[in-house]
Amino acid sequence: MPSSFVLVYHRSPYDEVINAEGERKWCDQKSPNGIIPTLRNLFRSQPSGTWIAWRQADDAEAVDETCTLEHPFRIRLRRIPLKQDQISSFYHVTSKEALWPVLHSFPSHFDINHADWSRFQEVNRRFAEAACHEAAPGASIWIHDYNLWLAPGYIRSLRADVKISLFHHTPFPSSDVFSILPWREEILESLLCCDAVGFHIPRYAENFARAASSLLKVQKGPKVPVPTHFVPCGSALAQPDATAWLDYKDRRVQLISTPVGTTPGLIDSLRWRSDVQTLITEIEQATKRGRRLILSASRVDYTKGNLELLLAYERLLERRVDLQSEVVLVLACVAANSGMKVYEDTQRSIEELVGRINGRFSRMDWVPIRLTTQRIPYAEMVAWFATADVCWITPLRDGLNLVAKEYAAARKGQGGTLVLSEFTGASVVMKGAVLTNPYSHRRMDDAIEAALAMPMDQQRSRMQSMVEAVEKLSVDHWAKEQLKAVQAPEAQAVR
């Protein structure tokens, strides 16, 4: 049955599990937070909706698989079979080794030699064809992230009647960095087939507008002041105004800036759950032991700034002998998938630096850094947020950073200090954070000192400001605003 709403995302709404009897079960992801539960909830009001994803299939003759998931509401799921070599080429090589470093403004990591653009095109075409097959006349198709950049163009060539939107979960770089990509025109031509293109913050939208207008004959709409929940100036990613739309080949493309949010109600309810309260007590007794706890949580990735953070912590302990034995840094740094050398090298460097710092400063009753590379269950993560005096999040570049928002949600009604890189999308909405430049030793040193010295009344005032931002810009708000753009009357061809 054709669907009026089609969501295109490489991940499935649930994880597929085959039990010992060979029966297939659909299970929730390990983390109850994130965007997948929100995307699933869209189908409560979209009874005629389909989710397009991939599945790994070794059979060369495998075809698209469709099924209907009924718990707790109906989602029609269509899964495209991809062989392991297709997934590796499309996702791990072209997406992660060629596109990812450019998106995050690390051109030195850009590797075109391993990229298989024809395979990338092939997989994007498969997703587009599946979406067109499922879409009813005039349907809305919502595509997610840069690894499906070419899907809008393929969809538009097949279906002039549908409305198309694509949301970027990553940064969008400045036009000169984006232009490094040899496929830049093909990517832009595809994105300009959309009715709306979404970004976390106005700076990314403006970067896209500049890239499009410098490489193609695009007419830019007027700039409008950014909404008041964004910081308009004063930091690296601040943007006072942004282009509202682009006209290209008789199509008006809306540019929508709405940061992905978290689920503050869920986090607050977890915070007070009995098992989380028990975990909080255990952390207080076993890890803090009267010390101040600094928490940093991220992934093993060269963009996340873990090495720069560790070096700043080492300088802090050198400079402030009085803080030795009085602070402890917990670094939750989830290991990346194996098989990617750049991430393996990064993890090895992190582990070596942690070993050096602990070797230099540890005492019989105190280890300055606790490192884990294992994924922490979400309820336990909330317990760490609730006990951390400082949350130290300083990526070199990050599209948004939900950890910063989750920390604020878990500290509602309390103090605590967020030290946040100004190169994260979250920095332009978390107005109570202590912003820092992870490229500057002095700025990093000053920020962590300021966080540790901040009086409690100032902590509470800043945290209240961040909690209000998190509650206003929730993940539900993000989904509503992005969908409104593609389903609104103005999301149509220029007259």
Image: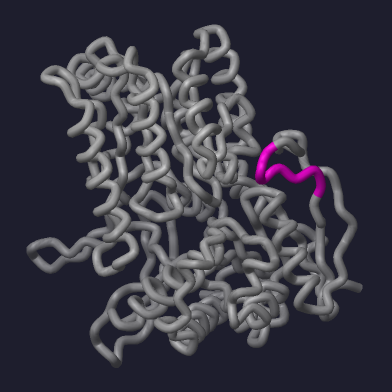
Q: Is residue 405 left or right of residue 14?
A: right
Which sits in the foreground, 205 or 36? 205
Residue 240 among magenta residues: yes
Region of the chain picked out in magenta, as a range: 235-241
Q: Colour scheme in the image?
A: one colour
Q: Position of residue 139 (x, y in %)?
A: 65, 70
Q: Would you place residue 215 above or below residue 346 in this image?
A: below
Q: What is the residue that sits farthest to the bottom in this orientation?
A: 61
Label the magenta part by its dominant secondary structure.
loop
Q: Residue at x 42, y 43 (%)?
A: 308
Q: Position of residue 208 (x, y in %)?
A: 70, 63
Can residue 51 be seen in the rendering of this structure?
no
Q: Residue at x 41, y 34 (%)?
A: 312
Q: Quadrant of residue 278?
A: top left
Residue 131 among magenta residues: no
Q: Position of residue 188 (x, y in %)?
A: 68, 75
Q: Would you place residue 416 above or below residue 113 in this image?
A: above
Q: How many marks?
A: 0
Q: Would you place residue 269 above or below residue 218 in this image?
A: above
Q: Residue at x 18, y 26 (%)?
A: 362
